[in-house]
Amino acid sequence: MMTASSTSLIQRVCAVPLSRAARTRAMAAASMNLSTTTTAPKSTDPQVLLGLSEPELQQLAIDFSQQGYRGKQLHHLIYKRKIKDIQDFSQVPLAFRNELEEAGWKVGRSPIYQSVTAADGTVKVLIRLEDNRLIETVGIPVKDEKGVMRLTACVSSQVGCPLRCSFCATGKGGFSRNLKRHEIVEQVLAIEEIFSHRVTNVVFMGMGEPMMNLKVVLEAHQCLNKDIQIGQRMITISTVGVPNTIKRLASHKLQSTLAVSLHAPNQKLRETIVPSAKAYPLSALMRDCRDYFTETGRRVSFEYALLAGVNDAVDHAVELAELLHEWGRGSHVNLIPFNPIEGSEYKRPSKKAVQAFAAALENNKVTVSTRQTRGLDADAACGQLRNKFQKSPLPVDSDNLQTEKDAAVAVAYAEGWGDIFRVADIAVMLDIYSSRRHKIIALSPPHGFTKRRKKGHFCN
């Protein structure tokens, strides 16, 4: 049965006041419920310029009775010159700048809270968001044989992560909320600013599960591609696997890479490493990956974190090869030797073990690469640096939660209570997902009995 709070959560929407008459924040809020005859630029980030396209910025200028070319100027100032404050838009008339600020608009850039540079040049950055939450982003510079630098930005999609993979520092730090579009885009601009170099590649492999914030991730992807001009083939979206989302991603037919965090060659072992795998059987995940390749023509990259004595045996490699061959061609395995994190029982495998695993895959005709470990002296593992400065996550933001059914199911299984829910109980899952205040959960499973199970805080 849907509860009132669940219905409210699912139906929550954001509107963007764009009328010139919206001179103050109060008037802007009131205008959300008023019809207007103007064509307004649509944004999932109300009052934030960063993330808007050039046509949207042109329309915004027109809404403020400016010429359309002022929107082009805004676009140049935001994305090329990377100016962070509206009052520093010196090319734009002072009156227009004041009007934007009076109506509640801002650029949408956040301050850098901390940065750490490793011996290999990798830079890990903590960005402090407007609500004081911290997110990580990483800049990874690599020079080729000709001395040309490729700069990769590893960006976060959530504040923390609800899926709690057993080896991941981000999951240990808890989950607060999804990131907004501009909060994803600004990570790339921050890396460019630190390196004084253009970002050439973006990987959604930072904090969080991108598929649980897919709508915003796709909006950020479009901005990175169209406005910051990073080629689609230079962007990778990763996932540990959330039911139905790979299909939705495939429908967009992007030319970007899908990276699936597999970490095990069979369902039983995968459930011990990735708890949410209980909601998404390996056979279903592999079927969706096969269909993704069929629909997009883009091969899937399977990420495999090597954990000493757990999943790094040659037998595991042979089993992995058999799994990939069973589900057809169009795949690639990227081996990731485990980055040690504080308090983890897992160990980094020896170089010999990594080489043997890779050789076993190659001998079984599987394309394989081994990720070069970067930033070991800069808390390189995802979530490590954030956990140092924000050990206890701030409360969950119920206004910015994923409300999709399959995402909630994945979280339910990751938390260990999804197996006692029916699909019809999705409203209950959403209630729990959106709050850390539940102490006791009363359930009515489909077999006619009532089961009670204690449930602590969602985040440690």
Image: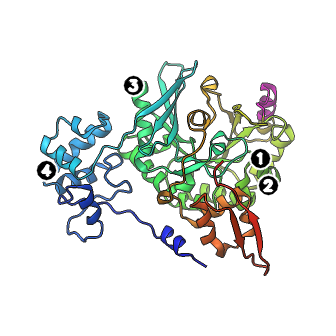
Q: What stretch is highlighted in magenta?
A: 347-359
Contact flag, marks 2 and 1 (Cβ < 8 Å): yes
Contact flag, marks 1 and 3 (Cβ < 8 Å): no
As measured in the structure, the alpha-carbon distance from the residue carrying label 4 to the one carrying label 3 is 32 Å
Q: Label 4 belongs to which residue?
A: 67
The disc, 2 or 4, on the residue closer to the chain's N-terminal end is 4
As measured in the structure, the alpha-carbon distance from the residue carrying label 2 to the one carrying label 4 is 59 Å
Residue 101 placement (x, y as % from top left): 23, 47
Q: Classify 10 Å Cα crowding around label 2: few (below 14), some (14-19), many (20 and above).
A: some
As measured in the structure, the alpha-carbon distance from the residue carrying label 3 to the one carrying label 2 is 45 Å
Amino acid at pointer 3: Ser
Q: Label 2 belongs to which residue?
A: 267
The disc, 3 or 2, on the residue closer to the chain's N-terminal end is 3
Q: Is residue 40 left or right of residue 288?
A: left
Q: Label 3 belongs to which residue?
A: 196
Q: Classify 10 Å Cα crowding around label 4: few (below 14), some (14-19), many (20 and above).
A: some
